[in-house]
Image (cartoon, rainbow, N blue to C red):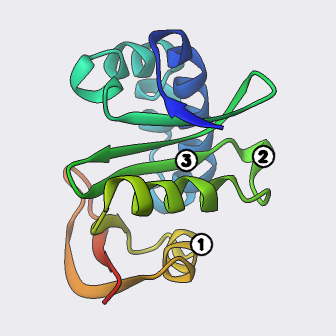
Amino acid sequence: MIRKAEKKDLSRIAEILVFVKRMKYRSIFHDDGYSFGNLQVISVAEEYSAPSILDNIWVYEEKGIVKGLIHIEDKEIIELYVDYFFQGQGIGSKLIEFAIKEHDVEFLWTLEKNQDAIAFYEAHGFKKTGDRQLEEGTPEYIIKCVYGI
C-alpha cells in the first residue's frame, strides 16, 4: 500500500535513505567522511521531519513495514528509494507509477553515473534530455529525465 508518510515513519525513512545512499553512492562519490560521518540516521530523520519535506513523501508499506519511499514536489520526483533488502520486488515500479498517475510527474534529476537508476527510469517512460549540471557541492553530474517524450 502506498500512503502519505507520517512522523512515525521518520526513523524508517532515514534508515532506508542512509543505507541505500551508502550502498549506491559511495562508489560514485568516494567520500567516506560524508557516507559514514555526515550521513547518519538521526540527522537525516531530523532533516526530513520538516513539514516542507515530510508533507511531500509517500511510503510503500507492506505488512506494517515501510519498504520504500518517493519524494515528490510539484511535478518532479525528488527521490525514490527502496530498502536494499526489498529491491527487485516491484516496489520502485509501484512508487513511480503512483507518481505518474496520481501526481502527474513530468521530470526528475539523477546521477549520471547511476546507470541502474537511469535504466529503471527509462523502463518507466522517462527519457534523458541532454540537460546536465553539477550536483551541488560535488564533482559529479546529474542529468534530467522527462516523462513521456
Which x, y percent locates residue 94? 61, 56
Q: Mark 1 highlights which residue?
A: 116
Crowding around mark 2 (Cα neighbors within 10 Å: few <14, some 14 to 19, many 20+) is few
> Label 2 belongs to which residue?
86
For marks 1 and 3, the one nearer the N-term is 3
User: Mark 1 and mark 3: span between their CA atoms?
Assistant: 12 Å
Query: Residue visible at 57% across and 73% down?
Result: 120
Q: In the rendered image, which residue does mark 3 sit on?
A: 81
Look at discs 1 and 3 and give the one toward the viewer. Answer: 3
Query: Residue at the spot x=48%, y=12% of the render?
Result: 42
Per the image, label 2 sits on a secondary structure element best described as helix
Instruction: From the top left corner, tell me how far across and down residue 108 is, in percent.
Output: 31, 64
> Upstream in the sequence, badge 2 or badge 1?
2
Front position among marks 2 and 1: 2
Relative to 27, say whether 130 is above or below. Answer: below
| Viewer-side residue, 83 vs 105 | 105
- Closer to the camera, 108 or 132? 108
The amino acid marked with disc number 2 is Phe
Q: Position of residue 8 (x, y in %)?
A: 54, 9
Cα gap from disc 2 to disc 3, whole angstroms: 10 Å
Question: On screen, 113 above or below 36?
Answer: below
Task: Answer with left or right where residue 49 lies relative to residue 117.
Answer: left
Please indicate whether residue 128 sits to the left or right of residue 93 in the image. left
Q: Quadrant of the N terminus?
A: top right
Element under label 3?
A: strand
